[in-house]
Image: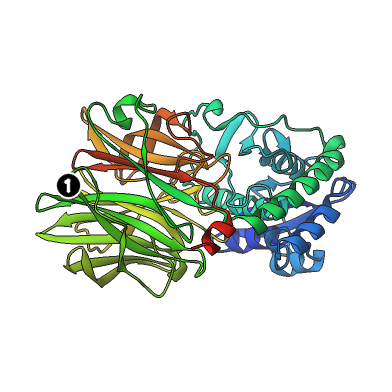
Amino acid sequence: MRMRVECNAKLARRWHLALVRRLKDVPDLAVSIKLIEGLPGSPPGLDALFQLEATIHGLAGYGQAERVAAADLFALADASDAPVDLVIDLCGNPMPGTERRWHLTYDGIAGEDGLIAAVLSGATPTVRLIEGEKIIAEGRLGTEYGGVALASFDEMLARTVTLIAAAVAGSCRTRLPNVRQEAAGPPAAIPSISRLGQSAARKVARRIVQQIYRLCYNSPHWRVGWRKLDGPDLFDLGAHPKTGWTDLPDDGRRFYADPFPFVHQGKLTLFVEDFIHRLGKGIISAVDFIDGRPAGTPVPVLEHNCHLSYPFIFEEEGQIWMVPETSANGTIELFRATAYPGGWVKETDLVSGLTCSDATLIRHDGAWWMFATVRDGGGAFSDALHLWSAPDFRGPWTAHKGNPVMIDIATARPAGRMVVRNGHLLRPVQDCRRGYGAALAIARVTKLDHDGFEQEIEAMIGPGPGWPGRRLHSLNSAGGFEFIDGSATAPKWKALSH
């Protein structure tokens, strides 16, 4: 099969190189490049904004957004001018030929313009590959750097490469779960391209305010909330309970996040990410619950050579196991408790060579399944859902043939243990459209097998009067208690006073 990729001659970027490299890995596929002349370049002021952000935020280079020479593209691609079977139009070529053609759009706008408009307005863009009126593939793009246009643009370009490569391989989905826009707050109206310069100027002013905030506050600073279950939980309510949550206090020098409660021999113990601001690294700590309250403050139970979070804990074969997030090592690692709640020793790597977030395991229909989001070739950590299956929780784990089974910043990333209600498998997921961990959604899995994966959204839950703040990030329960977490402000001078 022969394929041609068409790009704007004025906007050749590094992500085009990354895309061609990925496509060249497809067996029996020859890829050529055509640069389309006569199209407009970047909106006025955009390059100046990117340069300013790179200076303010210490961004090393432009990543996927970096401009490249046309010669670099031509050197990588097939130089043949033979007829092609498929064209991937990345720029909205105004004079297309007669070949079969996939058009790339962001929120219905061809080329970079739609993506830039979405980034500068803080919206969550939907990317699509379209052939005529048929959607070949689609995804909701996300970023871990909301408010930083250059970093957001870079991550979304990287995930665009993932989507196109998956579509060419025939494994990308064509339908996303429906989500209520208002659950994460309605995005600002996407400006027309002629107004992008004004929008960029407003963003620069906002960045200055954000930089001052970062100088004065530990950001982010998470907090854990808990409540005793005297009635329905959040899975059944689909909303905050009438009674509020009690905070797990911290000393201002650290935060607690990712609460995972676990009952062993009748005792409830809460495991959390314990992030010490001064060290910039997380460990796993734990605290027992006695007489319905935490018995003191969490104490360290697991430290590692990398940042740890999301202590997914379970019991199997009479022993207690943990799969904490070890994405900085490029692994998903399995630990075993030898002196519970401590004494954790590494048992094995379940997955290696990938940057995976929030691995969540469940036994379903006679097999073990593992869910995690994967940062594939850059891009966000939270929008590309991958699955693995295994006959045993220790492995060997086999990647799903459809990975990524979904690209969706609103419903991909796990947010806690999955549960079964009325015969349905429910998974809490993170809605990151308005930033990492901004809100929760409850997803009902409608298909989970070796052929594919599908889910529908049952409820969306954000911060509210019962849980004030800017974020709602995870959900777990055990022993008659329910736990969530979210963000709070923590002045740096508070930590200095201790």
Residue at 54%, 33% (x, y): give it: 184
Q: Nearer the viewer, residue 376 or 427?
A: 427
Q: Measuring from the top left, give residue 316's x and y in whole percent.
A: 14, 56
Residue 242 vertical placement versus 339 (above, below): above
Q: Is residue 264 left or right of residue 330?
A: left
* Residue situated furthest bottom in the rendering: 305
Q: How is the image coloured?
A: rainbow
Q: Measuring from the top left, give residue 236's x and y in whole percent.
A: 29, 27
- If the image is split into quadrants, where does the N terminus sit? bottom right
- Return the residue at label 1: 366
Amino acid type for the residue under numbered disc 1: Gly
Question: In this view of the protein, can residue 66 be seen by the observer?
Answer: no
Question: In this view of the protein, can residue 73 be seen by the observer?
Answer: yes
- Assign a secondary structure to mark 1: loop
Residue at 74%, 64% (x, y): give it: 73
Q: Measuring from the top left, give residue 133's x and y in whole percent.
A: 63, 28
Residue 130 image-quadrant placement: top right
